[in-house]
Image: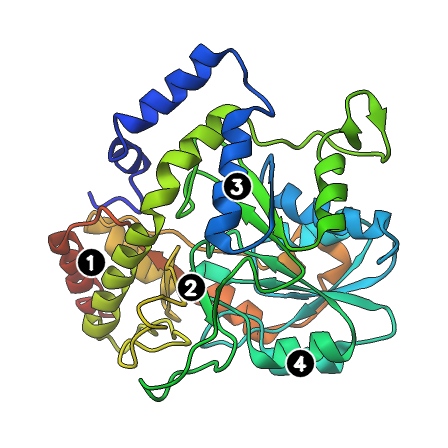
């Protein structure tokens, strides 16, 4: 069986450092808001390239807290609108509605799965206060047109970087056509005013439970978020805000500190597997993912714009293909079978027509991808996909 992602094997590959880190926390007798969390926040901020990192309980809370902080600061108010991709995991939209803000759903580019930069401006109103940009499946979604719109209308640019930790964006150009191009490179998570990150176990940088973080260069925003995440308190028992309890615990921080130094190496291995898939899967019933920076043109001086959290293909015969692969002991998943605007939770959007989003959700299938996959396993997947026939 080729598993979609063998988490036990992934975590075993970090031994004995992982077990030692957990043991050190247990021996310390300090389990919240301690040195492991403080150290991880400093290391992760340096990795992303921001002044601040605030560890929180999960990726959804990270986004919730950013928007809640903006409301507390008077930048936004209930009823304001936030631009968000229609094609995303529901958490991106939950963070908006949870703060009594209004999600404005934008269709994706069917080739990249990410928000279509050229469909944003037409949806701007006098109530629009921000753009929540989702780097879906691991691919940078930032584009010069998005920055242009954000600047023109003075909008807050918030990144959902839950799936793309470690990816890069070149703010000078969106597509490399010349290997001699100049580069102005930043990591996703440092592109906007603030970013939410997830360390869910299956992510490229995953802990042993739930975990998340906010990164930002805004001192005031960071201070408000840190207080909001700790019952609204910057000083024990003194609450300035009606806050939440959303903190990254010491064990998860210690685990993440062990894994962070290897993340770029693991992401590069994912990139190599994706390259093999893209160069060798040839089937008339399968549409391969499109990357902003093509394999033929290389990367941003070795820095990749897609960290391949998921390798997602499309097929109008998705269900048959998934069954075919399962019969050959290849595990696949669907990310995601029902778009947010068709979920019961969002009845108010059920009548909305987003044909590109709906087509994507009806056709996508995620193939196994893991930094621990062997080349033999990769070619087994390739062979099975190529042999699929109706």
Distance Cα–Cα, label 4 vs label 2: 31 Å
Image point (75%, 51%), residue name = 67
Distance Cα–Cα, label 4 vs label 3: 31 Å
Q: Nearer the viewer, mark 4 or mark 2?
A: 4
Judge by depth and name the residue closer to the eye, 196 or 314.
196
Label 1 or label 4, whichever comes before in sequence order: 4
Label pair 2/1, CB-CB below 8 angstroms: no
Q: Secondary structure at mark 4?
A: helix
Q: Is residue 186 above or below residue 151?
A: above
Distance Cα–Cα, label 1 vs label 4: 41 Å
Image point (58%, 43%), residue name = 213
Give residue 42's mark.
3
Residue linked to disc 2? 364
Image location (x, y in percent) of residue 56: 61, 37
Residue linked to disc 4? 148
Label pair 2/3, CB-CB below 8 angstroms: no
The quadrant the N terminus occupies is top left
Judge by depth and name the residue closer to the eye, 343 or 296.
296
Give residue 381's mark.
1
Label 2 or label 1, whichever comes before in sequence order: 2
Task: Examine the image and state in which quarter residue 78 appears.
Answer: bottom right
Q: Secondary structure at mark 2?
A: strand
Residue 369 in view in this figure: no
Label 2 or label 3, whichever comes before in sequence order: 3
Image location (x, y in percent) of residue 261: 35, 44
Image location (x, y in percent) of residue 155: 76, 69
Total marks shown come to 4
Distance Cα–Cα, label 2 vs label 3: 37 Å
Label 4 or label 3, whichever comes before in sequence order: 3
Q: Is residue 87 above or below residue 18?
A: below
Q: Secondary structure at mark 3?
A: helix
Q: Nearer the viewer, mark 3 or mark 1?
A: 3
């Amino acid at each position: 069986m080729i598993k979609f992602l063998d988490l036990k094997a992934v975590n075993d590959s970090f031994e004995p450092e992982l077990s030692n880190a957990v043991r050190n926390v247990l021996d310390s007798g300090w389990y919240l808001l301690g040195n492991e969390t403080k150290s991880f926040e400093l290391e992760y901020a340096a990795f992303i390239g921001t002044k601040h990192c605030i560890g929180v309980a999960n990726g959804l809370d990270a986004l919730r807290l950013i928007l809640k902080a903006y409301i507390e600061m008077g930048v936004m108010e209930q009823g304001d609108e936030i631009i968000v991709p229609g094609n995303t995991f529901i958490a991106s939209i939950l963070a908006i509605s949870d703060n009594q803000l209004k999600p404005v759903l934008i269709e994706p580019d069917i080739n990249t799965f990410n928000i279509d930069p050229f469909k944003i401006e037409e949806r701007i109103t006098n109530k629009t206060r921000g753009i929540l940009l989702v780097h879906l499946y691991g691919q940078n979604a930032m584009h010069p047109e998005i920055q242009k719109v954000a600047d023109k209308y003075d909008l807050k640019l918030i990144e959902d970087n839950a799936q793309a930790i470690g990816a890069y964006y070149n703010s000078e150009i969106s597509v490399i056509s010349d290997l001699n191009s100049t580069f102005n490179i930043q990591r996703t998570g440092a592109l906007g005013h603030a970013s939410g990150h997830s360390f869910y176990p299956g992510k490229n940088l995953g802990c042993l439970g739930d975990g998340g973080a906010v990164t930002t260069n805004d001192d005031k925003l960071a201070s408000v978020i840190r207080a909001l995440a700790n019952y609204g308190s910057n000083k024990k028992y003194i609450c300035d805000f009606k806050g939440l309890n959303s903190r990254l615990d010491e064990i998860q921080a210690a685990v993440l500190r062990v894994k962070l130094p290897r993340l770029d190496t693991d992401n590069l291995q994912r990139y190599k597997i994706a390259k093999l898939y893209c160069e060798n899967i040839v089937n008339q019933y399968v549409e391969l993912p499109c990357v902003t920076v093509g394999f033929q043109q290389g990367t941003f001086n070795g820095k990749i714009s897609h960290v391949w959290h998921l390798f997602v293909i499309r097929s109008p015969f998705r269900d048959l293909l998934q069954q075919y692969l399962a019969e050959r002991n290849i595990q696949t998943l669907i990310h995601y079978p029902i778009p947010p605007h068709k979920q019961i939770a969002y009845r108010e959007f059920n009548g909305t027509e987003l044909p590109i989003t709906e087509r994507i959700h009806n056709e996508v299938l995620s193939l196994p991808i893991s930094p621990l996959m062997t080349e033999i396993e990769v070619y087994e997947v390739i062979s099975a996909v190529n042999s699929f026939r109706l």
